[in-house]
Amino acid sequence: MKKFTVYAALLALCMASVTQAQTNQRTQFNQGLAMFNELVMQHELGEAIDLIQIDKAYGEKDIEALNDVLRKTVPDDFVGSSTVQTAALKNGFRQELLAYWTEAGDYFYVYILMHRREDGFAVLNLQYGKDVQELLGLF
């Protein structure tokens, strides 16, 4: 009986730490997504991509070039953003399709495929543009 009690206590501790780790990763993901959205809403696509693609080094020229792409694609200010579609896949993989729109009805979309690892999320694929059908086809 003592053995069972010890095993039950260990299992409870392990479950608590797994739950806490998942909660922390979910919180980190939500905070990162909020920061990403804020940057895109400000037409700072380069900074947003640099924020989430930590395994790639972006120089100032690269960041400014990405910002210019967004400003030329959608010159007006964004007035809203939302997640269009999300899919939690197996083994920590996840897809997100994000939308940003202007008062005039112009839309800009960002598709992200990521993988949750012990040290956070790794972005495996990131695409963006105005063609929602093309990006929805990635799901």
Image: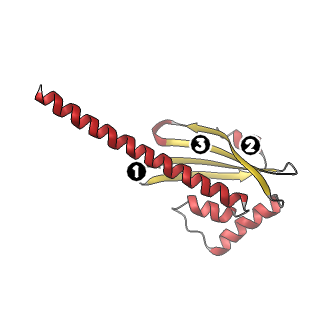
On the rendered structure, is 41 left or right of 27?
right
Q: Quadrant of residue 134?
A: top right
Q: Nearer the viewer, mark 1 or mark 2?
A: 1
Quarter occupied by the N terminus: top left
39 vs 62: above or below: above
Residue 123, image x and y in percent?
55, 53
Q: Amino acid at mark 1?
A: Glu
Crowd tier of the residue under label 3, counting other residues whose Cα lies within 10 Å: few below 14, some 14–19, many 20 or above? many
Point out which mark residue 95 bears. Answer: 3
Q: CA distance from mark 1 to mark 3?
A: 18 Å
Q: Secondary structure at mark 2?
A: helix
Crowd tier of the residue under label 1, counting other residues whose Cα lies within 10 Å: few below 14, some 14–19, many 20 or above? few
Q: Residue furthest top?
A: 1
Q: Quadrant of residue 61?
A: bottom right
**Mark closest to the chain's N terminus, 1 or 2:** 1
Q: Amino acid at mark 2?
A: Glu
Q: Secondary structure at mark 1?
A: loop
Q: Residue beneath label 1, please?
A: 118
89 vs 109: above or below: above
Q: Amino acid at mark 3?
A: Gln
Q: Residue furthest bottom?
A: 60
Q: Nearer the viewer, mark 2 or mark 3?
A: 3
Q: Residue beneath label 2, please?
A: 134
